Amino acid sequence: MLALERLTGFVESVRKDVAAARARDPATRDVGAVQILISYAGVQALFMHRVSHALNDQGVPVLPRLLSYGARIATGVEIHPAAEIGSCCFIDHGSGVVIGETAIVGDCVTLYQGVTLGGTGFQTGKRHPTLEKNVTVGSGAKLLGPITVGHGSKVGANTVVIHDVPPNTTVVGNPGHPVRVEGKKPEGPDTDWIHLPDPVAEALKKLSERVASLEDVVEEITGRKQEPAEVKELHRKKGPSPAGG
Ligand SMILES: CC(C)(COP(=O)(O)OP(=O)(O)OC[C@H]1O[C@@H](n2cnc3c(N)ncnc32)[C@H](O)[C@@H]1OP(=O)(O)O)[C@@H](O)C(=O)NCCC(=O)NCCS
């Protein structure tokens, strides 16, 4: 009876994963459930993980790790059998996703290719991130350590997150910093991550001002006009910072 319940639960979670792929990938518009199951690496990786996780929970030796390794070869997604993954999750494209042993991924989370939910070093115990429900993590993002990403938050592509992220917040850049909280730009003196002070440009500006005033003094003493030096004024570049943000 218990085995039947487990099997039904397993089939239901795979059905939800396929539905999640269909809901969140516009390319699946005309694709049937079976085709998604046999040709979507992210869906297959979750399928394999759900089997290896169940076996791992039962204390079955070796096999869960072998399944996880097989899934990695077939899909490019490496999920430790002990990692907890909620329902309706979607891993788009698959390749390069790594989910560590103590990671917890809530319901309806979306991960793009190249996402790492990893540890920061050689610690033991809980050392991987927890993602609450409805979190989206962009391609190439690295989430490191036992941090929590609050529900509904978005992590931009290539972001590196090493601190907790509050719910409904968008973080981007390296280190990841909030650019939207509840849909609004954060306010306050420490929130402008894009227009960071540039100490080198400030120093050059001061230096060229000093040279100009010294030239005035020399001109006064000698009576000879100095040729103006070709010092271009420094302007901040507009647009997003190349450091992210
Ligand atoms: C972060 C993201 C989820 C957008 O979230 P959002 O809450 O809608 O935020 P916005 O688009 O309004 O962007 C907020 C700010 O972050 C900046 N930003 C967005 N994504 C960024 C990124 N990956 N890196 C750096 N800055 C980014 C925007 O330019 C904007 O800056 P502004 O405040 O100066 O206007 C999205 O940009 C992203 O990275 N998605 C991942 C998609 C992906 O990986 N696709 C792969 C498909 S194969």
Image: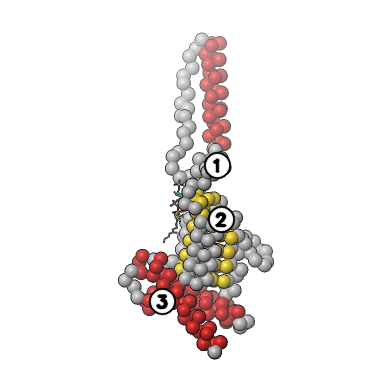
Q: Amino acid at mark 1?
A: Gly
Instruction: Give the amino acid type for the residue marked by disc 2 in the picture.
Output: Pro
Q: Position of residue 217 (x, y in %)?
A: 55, 15
**Above or below, 40 relative to 175:** below
Residue 37 is tagged as 3
C-alpha span from label 1 to label 2 = 17 Å
Mark 3, other Cα within 10 Å: few <14 / some 14–19 / many ≥20: some
Q: Who comes first in sequence, dot 1 or dot 3?
A: 3
Q: Disc 1, disc 2: CB below 8 Å?
A: no
Q: Say if 182 sits above or below 91 in the image.
A: above
Q: Can you name the residue that lies furthest to the bottom here?
A: 1
User: Dot 2: within a 10 Å radius of its alpha carbon, few (fewer than 14), some, or many (20 or more) residues?
Assistant: some
* Label 1 CA crowd tier, 10 Å (few <14, some 14–19, many 20+): few
Residue 134 or residue 46, whichever sits in front: 134
Q: Residue at x 56, y 77 (%)?
A: 53
Q: Secondary structure at mark 3?
A: helix
